[in-house]
Amino acid sequence: MGNKAFSNRNVLIICADEMRGDCAGFMGNPDIKTPNLDRLAGQSVVFEQFMTVFPKCMPARASMMTGRYCHTGAWRTVAYQHLPAEQTTLLERFREQGYETAVLGKNHCWDTQVYERDVDYRSYSGELGQLMEGVPRIRVHEPNPNGAIPLELEDGWDYIGCNTRFADDEVKAEQAIRYLRDYRDRSKPFFLQVNIEAPHPVYGVEEPYYSMYDREGIAAWPHTLPKGATLPMIAQRKYRTGESDNERAVREIQSVYYGMITKVDTLVGSILAELEEQGLDRNTLVLFWSDHGDYAGQYGLVEKWDTCFQDCLMHVPFLMRGPGLPEGKRIGGLGDTTDIAPTLCELLGFEPLPGMHGESLLPAIHGGGMKRAVFADGGHEDALLLRAEAEMGSQMSFGADQPARRDAKSITYASCPDAMARAKMVRTDKYKLIIRLRGGNELYDMEADPQEMNNRWGDPALAEVLPELMQLMIEWCLRTDPEEPHLARFTV
């Protein structure tokens, strides 16, 4: 049954792409400046241990919109950028309930036919699309004020440092403001999702954000590989960022990444200010989240990887503000992105989506507990691995004008396909277990080793925790095994 306080209310979802859960002031990071998000958090329910279910954009966004784990619909592969047209999502529920819909920024979720049919306002078409005309969507280099790009960051690190003003995200924020101010149908509630590109790599941002953070003053993340690192991390270091440890490079990447997040905070602030200016904050449910995190230099790595499940990739910010919800409440238990759809369905009184695996967060908000464990999966099927190896390998060039790391991610795919073999993760408050078909397993004591620097797989001292973790993972697989194709002739 829906909450009467939210019946027929507006919904605003802001998604930052690739923002780590530990990179906001309201999440306890003393180095980063996020005043607008901190203010929003003070008015919201904050989930402190919220996890994504896949460390890549499209599958993670699919889980949020369906309440389902990625392996149940074959959403984990690089081949599919959208959900199938027949997949029921939250978007359809909003349309069924008479909402006007606006999705700004990249789609990266819905089938194109569904997206164009069910989204009233989009960034790259129609009235709002005119604001995008002439806006460069590629970051353009300009000289760094502190000198040239450091030599060690030229290859494989996805780094450009200080760049000319990258206006794409600013236009998305302006589109959101213009939609709220000028275009929305005031006779209907609205569903507005703003997909901000930053802080997704490449790592670059204009001033004043580029120089905002003291490279030597921040608390730097570990720049070495963990003890007992498995094949995916080793392959990334070999083919992307180099096998030599480099703390200077990590500090540079981390500082620019912080600057990108502070810019996101500025854009979020401008959207929220317009919401308040029109008095819409009083009847609008606001969600802020990220699809997954980013290495951002940690372990000497960049971006993310489909079969790696460190908390820097899996832990994401998530908060909810709205009438009837507590202000400033913090919930420390585990939750994940499959929980967003069932929460919205219950909160707004929607019919539940078919086959949701997630759980509504409303009981936890009102004093109940959170999950005992969260799960994730990644990696690709063998057929796709072979195809990716052939296609990506054919695209590589090693000529004098194209260094070997020009497309370092593709080179890693092609050179080490086993680094993309299927894998699954289970995480409790105390432990994390990762099982791979190929490339090595991982086991971490998350209380003693929160940075995951010591892989304890095979350590007799932790042998007693394995049966429970294995059972949790197996039971999760049994609960969520795909049941398609549905045999309609069979009845229960």
Image (spheres, rainbow, N blue to C red):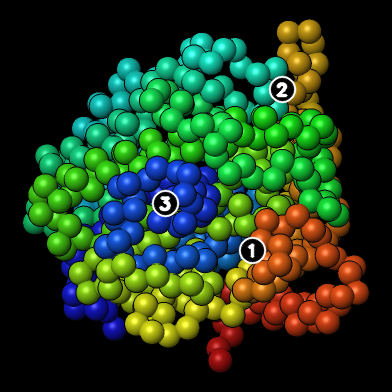
Examine the rendering and report whether any part of residue 461 can be seen.
yes
Crowd around label 2: few <14 · some 14–19 · many ≥20 (10 Å): few
| Mark drawn on residue 376 | 1
User: Which amino acid type is marked by label 2?
Assistant: Glu
Residue 80 vs residue 415: left or right? Answer: left
For the residues marked 2 and 3, what is the alpha-carbon distance in whole angstroms? Answer: 30 Å
User: Residue 415: image x %, image y %?
Assistant: 84, 35
Mark 3 and mark 2 in contact (Cβ < 8 Å)?
A: no
Name the quarter where the C terminus is drawn: bottom right
Mark 2 and mark 1 in contact (Cβ < 8 Å)?
A: no
On screen, residue 165 above or below 15: above
For the residues marked 1 and 3, what is the alpha-carbon distance in whole angstroms? Answer: 26 Å
User: Residue 33: image x %, image y %?
Assistant: 40, 42
Q: Secondary structure at mark 1?
A: strand
User: Which amino acid type is marked by label 1?
Assistant: Ala
User: Which amino acid type is marked by label 3?
Assistant: Gly
On screen, residue 39 above or below 197: below
- Reading the image, the residue beneath label 2 is 152
User: Residue 7: image x %, image y %?
Assistant: 19, 72
| Mark drawn on residue 215 | none
- Reading the image, the residue beneath label 3 is 25
The quarter of the displayed image where residue 484 is located: bottom right
On screen, residue 234 above or below 129: below
On screen, residue 316 above or below 236: below
Crowd around label 3: few <14 · some 14–19 · many ≥20 (10 Å): some
Residue 134 vs residue 48: left or right? Answer: left
- The first of marks 1 and 2 along the sequence is 2
